[in-house]
Image (cartoon, rainbow, N blue to C red):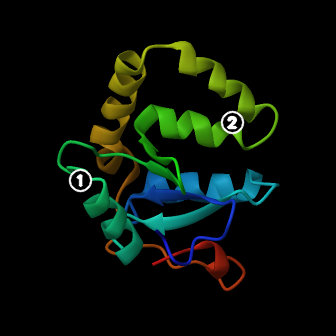
């Protein structure tokens, strides 16, 4: 479905103007030793395509999305924990929190998401990847 998504890669869709989200993307890039992830801002063409295809109400789902070809999307705390699971030891241990019911995990996630601009700030436009990282980003 996503034309430029490389085979066997997972796509992290994130809020491109959120400082916390951008810092999280930088953290994933730094610790993604197996080069599992690609990235796209929710505000870009790829993000909008996935939002439309999966009929995601962005007013209700203020979230990071993890897209896997053939499997679809997961979001909120499930996406964050599945991403952590691919980042190697000790970050992969965070997957243990998947045993907590999503309603509880997502309550915490939603609280942080609701306050992220106030706590971490917001940019006027999406981050622009460096030349070294451009191949890992989709528009």
> For the residues carrying marks 1 and 2, which lies nearer the camera in this image?
1
Q: Which residue is mark 2?
A: 85
Residue shown at the point (30%, 60%) measured from the top left: 53
Left or right: 23 with respect to 33? left
The residue nearer to you, when weighing 110 against 55, is 55
In this picture, is 57 found above or below 52?
A: above
Mark 2, secondary structure of its residue: helix
Residue shown at the point (20%, 42%) measured from the top left: 60
Q: Are the residues flagged by discs 1 and 2 in contact, CB closer than 8 Å?
A: no
- Residue 98 x/y as whole percent: 55, 21
Left or right: 57 with respect to 112? left
Q: Mark 2 packing: few (<14 Cα in 10 Å), some, or many (20+)?
A: some
In this picture, is 96 found above or below 117?
A: above
- Residue 58 x/y as whole percent: 23, 52
Q: Which residue is mark 1?
A: 55
Q: Determine the residue located farthest toward the front in the rendered image.
A: 70
Q: Label 1, label 2: how many angstroms apart (C-alpha)?
A: 27 Å
Left or right: 37 with respect to 80? right
- Residue 18 x/y as whole percent: 39, 58
Q: Mark 1 packing: few (<14 Cα in 10 Å), some, or many (20+)?
A: few
In this picture, is 102 found above or below 114?
A: above
The residue nearer to you, when weighing 2 against 43, is 2
The residue nearer to you, when weighing 135 against 120, is 135
Please state the total of marks drawn on the protein image: 2
Counting residues from the N terminus, which is met first, the one under dot 1 or under dot 2? Answer: 1
- Residue 63 x/y as whole percent: 36, 46
Q: Which mark is residue 6?
A: none
């Amino acid at each position: 479905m996503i034309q430029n998504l490389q085979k066997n890669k997972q796509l992290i869709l994130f809020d491109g103007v959120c400082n916390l989200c951008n810092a999280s993307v930088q953290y994933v890039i730094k610790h993604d030793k197996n080069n599992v992830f690609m990235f796209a801002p929710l505000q870009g063409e790829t993000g909008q395509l996935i939002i439309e295809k999966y009929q995601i109400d962005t007013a209700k789902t203020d979230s990071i999305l993890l897209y896997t070809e053939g499997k679809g999307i997961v979001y909120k705390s499930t996406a964050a924990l599945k991403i952590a699971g691919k980042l190697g030891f000790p970050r992969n241990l965070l997957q243990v929190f998947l045993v907590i019911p999503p309603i509880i995990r997502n309550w915490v996630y939603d609280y942080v998401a609701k306050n992220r601009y106030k706590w971490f700030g917001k940019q006027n436009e999406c981050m622009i990847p460096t030349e070294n990282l451009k191949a890992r980003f989709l528009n």
